[in-house]
Amino acid sequence: MNAPVLVLKDSLKRESGTKVHHGNIQASKAVADIIRTTLGPRSMLKMLLDAGGGIVVTNDGNAILRELDVAHPAAKSMIELSRTQDEEVGDGTTSVIVLAGEMLHVAEAFIEKSYHPTVICRAYNKALEDAIAVLDKIAMSVDVNDRATVLGLVKSCIGTKFTSQFGDLIADLAIDATTTVGVDLGQGLREVDIKKYIKVEKVPGGQLEDSKVLKGVMFNKDVVAPGKMKRKIVNPRIILLDCPLEYKKGENQTNAELVREEDWEVLLKLEEEYIENICVQILKFKPDLVITEKGLSDLACHYFSKAGVSAIRRLRKTDNNRIAKACGAVIVNRPDELQESDVGTGAGLFEVKKIGDDFFAFVVDCKEPKACTVLLRGPSKDLLNEVERNLQDAMSVSRNIIKNPKLVPGGGATELTVSATLKQKSATIEGIEKWPYEAAAIAFEAIPRTLAQNCGVNVIRTMTALQGKHANGENAWTGIDGNTGAIADMKESKIWDAYNVRAQTFKTAIEAACMLLRIDDIVSGIKKKQAPGAGPSKPTIETEGDADNEQILPD
C-alpha cells in the first residue's frame, strides 16, 4: 500500500522551500557583486571577452551584464533588470542591480527566521511607496533652458563613467544633440527620440577633442561617379527617393521571342526612354543632389552628371529618414509624384570628405535640423565603443530632464534621506511587517556605502557620520563626494540625479526583489516543448537505404 508515489519524472530536479530562497538570494548577490565596483566616479572597468573573441572594456552596468552568460535563473532575471532600466531611463543600470541585491540580502535573515515571503514583500512595497513620496518631497524643479544646470546634471551622470576625464566634452555633445532633436508636443511636453534621430558615427583616428555634433547628418557614402559629380554644393536642393532609378525587371520571369532584329533595338530603346523619363521628371525640379535608397543605373547616372546633379545610391532607410528630418525634404516613392514641397532646401552645405580611409558625405549647416549626427573620433575602436556607450547614457539623462525637469541630489544623498525617513516611519508600523520595513530602509544605504567603498575611505566612519547628519533630517543634500570620499553638500558640488532615474531605480529594484522572494519552487530538467505550429514530429521510418547502416532509432 505505502509504495512511494512518483509524480515527477526521475529526470526532473525539484528544489523547494527555503533552499530555493537561499539559492536565489546567493545568485542575485553574486550578480550584484560583479557590478558593485563599477558604481561611482572612482569605478573600475571590466574587460569581457565575447564569443567572437572581441573584447569589451566598460563600466556600464548594462553593457557588462549583457555580455555575461548566466546559468542560474534568478541571476538571469537580475540581468533583465538592468536592461529594463537602460531602456526606460538609460542611466542607473548599476545602482538597480546593487540595490536589488541588497534588498534580497537583508531579506535573507527574515527567511531564516521563517517569515513568510509575502509578509516581507508587503513591507517592501510599503517602503517603496514611502520612498517615492520622499523623492517627491526632496525633488526640485529645474529650468530646462538653463544650460549650466543641465550641464552640471549630465556631467554628474557621466562623472561615474570612463569619459569623465574628458571634462565637459561628452556632456556638451549630449546636450547639443538632444536639444537639437527635441520636438514640442504642446502642453509643455517635449519628445526626444534618441534612437531614431541621433546617429553616432564612430570614426577611428584623430583625437577625442575632434568629436562634435553636426548641425545635420553624415553617412558613409560617396557620390556615384566621383570624377563627374560635384562633391561640394552650397545650399543644395535635395530630393530623397526610395525607388530604384533603373529599368524595372519584371516580378516573374518572362521570355520574349523576337522575330525581327529591329525589335531588339526597340526594346533597348524602351528601357532607355523609361530611365530618361524618370530622370527628366526629377530634373524638372532642378535638384543639386538626388539620394535614393535603391539602385541607380549607369544611364541615370549619366543623365544626372550631365545636368550637374550629384547622386548617391543605396542609402540606409534610417539614414534617409534622418536626412529628411534635417533638411526638410519629403521622401518620395514615385518620381512622377514629385512636388516642389518635397524638395529639401534646409541644408546649407553638402560635401564629401575623406576621413581616414572612407568617404563620408555630410549634409550640414541645416536651418532647423530635427535630426543630427554625433561624430566621434578617437584612437582605438574599444575606446570609441566605450565613449559611445557613455554618450548614450548622457543623452538619455538630458532627455529625461527635458521630459521631466526635476532633480534629486546624487552622491548617495537621496538614498540616505529615504533611508532615514523610512527608519523614522518604521516606528509607527504595527505588527510583524515592521522589521522587514526597517530592513528595506537599511538596504537603501547600499548605494552610498558602495560609493564610499569604491573611493577607498573608511566606510564605517563615513557611513556613521552620514547617518548622523541625515537622522535628524536637517539637510537632505549631504552625500559623498565620489572622487575624494569626503562628506559634502551635493547642492554646492553640483552632483545631481534626474528624478525619474532614481524613481525608476527604486521601483525596479524593489519589485524585482519581491518577485524573486516569492519563488518557492524551482523545477528544472523540463524537456523542450516543440515550437507552436510545428506539429507532432513524424515517426522516422527506415527506408531500405539506411536499413543497412543499422542506426538505432532514438526511442
Image (spheres, rainbow, N blue to C red):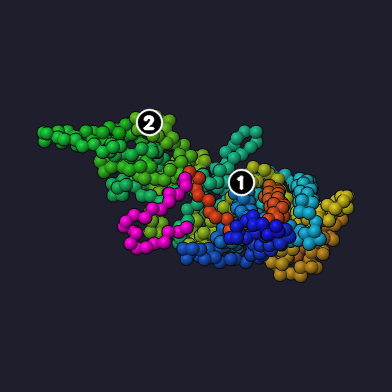
Residue at coordinates 55% horizontally, 46% vertically from top-left? 194
Q: Secondary structure at mark 1?
A: helix
In the rendered image of this protein, does residue 188 appear above or below residue 74? above
Q: Position of residue 279 (x, y in %)?
A: 30, 35
Asked if residue 243 lies left or right of residue 77, the reply is: left
Q: How far from the left and from the top, in percent, is residue 88?
A: 62, 47
Q: Locate residue 471: give its quadrant.
A: bottom right
Q: Which residues are magenta?
A: 534-555
Residue placed most toward the observer, 288 or 498: 498
Visible residue check, residue 274: yes
What secondary structure prevails in the magenta region?
Answer: loop
Q: Position of residue 82 (x, y in %)?
A: 62, 54
Q: Is residue 162 above or below residue 303?
A: below
Nearer-N-terminus badge (1/2): 2
What distance separates the C-alpha of mark 1 from that of mark 2?
36 Å
Q: Secondary structure at mark 2?
A: loop
Is residue 543 in the magenta section? yes
**Picture disc at residue 503:** none
Q: Please tell me the numbered disc located at residue 399.
A: 1
Few, some or many residues within 10 Å of mark 1 (<14, 14–19, 20+): many
In the drawing, what numbered circle is on residue 338?
2
x and y, in percent, of residue 494 in the image? 71, 55
Identify the residue shown where x is 33% and y is 62%: 548
- Contact between marks 1 and 2 (CB within 8 A): the answer is no
Return the residue nearer the eye: 55 or 237: 55
Quadrant of the snapshot with the N terminus: bottom right
Residue 522 sits in quarter: bottom right
Res. 509 in view = no
Residue 10 sits above or below residue 341 on the image: below
Q: Does residue 157 appear left or right of residue 424 in this picture?
A: left
